Amino acid sequence: MTVNLVTGKCLCGQISVSVPETILKQTSYNLYLPEKDAIIQGEPKIYLDSNTTNGQIIQRAFCENCGSPIYGRNPTSSRLIAVKLGIFDELTKPSIALFCKDRPEWNRLIDGIQDYDIMPS
């Protein structure tokens, strides 16, 4: 079976991420998917972020050339990767919203999606 891929790129085009089109339709503000399903081309720079809500270190990947955020992942936990949706030219309506407890008042709810105050387990 052929899988249609959707590809996103950083601003300068040095790093790209391709994901199955069917997964892209099930998005939140980050695209959470199994790491094995994300095809990353190029070498992002990794920042180890320890200033997180649960205290676990998150690897934050970005393009060293243009600074575009690419993805985040917890190297000690699940094998999920959180690809930044800003690298894709076209997006569908999200299906969930995460960390809503930190949502600014001006940022309205989206009708028909599930809100979570924190990352669901």
Image: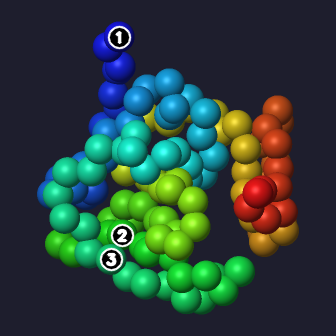
Q: At 38% from the left edge and 82% from the top edge, which residue is drawn?
A: 47
Q: Does residue 119 appear left or right of residue 72 in this picture?
A: right
Give the position of the N terminus as an image quadrant: top left
Give the position of the C terminus as an image quadrant: bottom right
Classify 14 as above or below 92: below
Q: CA distance from mark 2 to mark 3?
A: 5 Å
Asked which quadrant contains residue 102, the reply is bottom right
Image x and y of residue 117, in percent: 84, 63
Q: Which residue is mark 1?
A: 1
Number of the label disc, if any, that sits on residue 39? none
Q: At 52% from the left edge and 54% from the top edge, which residue is drawn?
A: 80
Callout 2 touching callout 3 (CB < 8 Å): yes
Q: CA distance from mark 1 to mark 3?
A: 34 Å
Q: Nearer the viewer, residue 23 or 64?
A: 23
Classify 72 as above or below 33: below
Question: Which amino acid, mark 1?
Answer: Met
Image x and y of residue 38, in percent: 37, 44
- Per the image, label 2 sits on a secondary structure element best described as strand
Image x and y of residue 43, in percent: 19, 64
Q: At 63% from the left edge and 46% from the top edge, which residue is drawn?
A: 28
Q: Which residue is mark 3?
A: 46
Q: Does residue 4 appear left or right of residue 50 in this picture?
A: left
Q: Does residue 96 appear left or right of residue 48 in this picture?
A: right
Q: Which residue is mark 2?
A: 61
**Around disc 2, counting alpha carbons within 10 Å, would you say few (fewer than 14), some (14 to 19), or many (20 or more)?**
many
Image x and y of residue 106, in percent: 78, 63
**Around disc 3, counting alpha carbons within 10 Å, would you say few (fewer than 14), some (14 to 19), or many (20 or more)?**
some
Question: Which amino acid, mark 3?
Answer: Ile
Question: Which amino acid, mark 2?
Answer: Ala
Callout 1 touching callout 3 (CB < 8 Å): no
How many marks do you count on the picture? Answer: 3
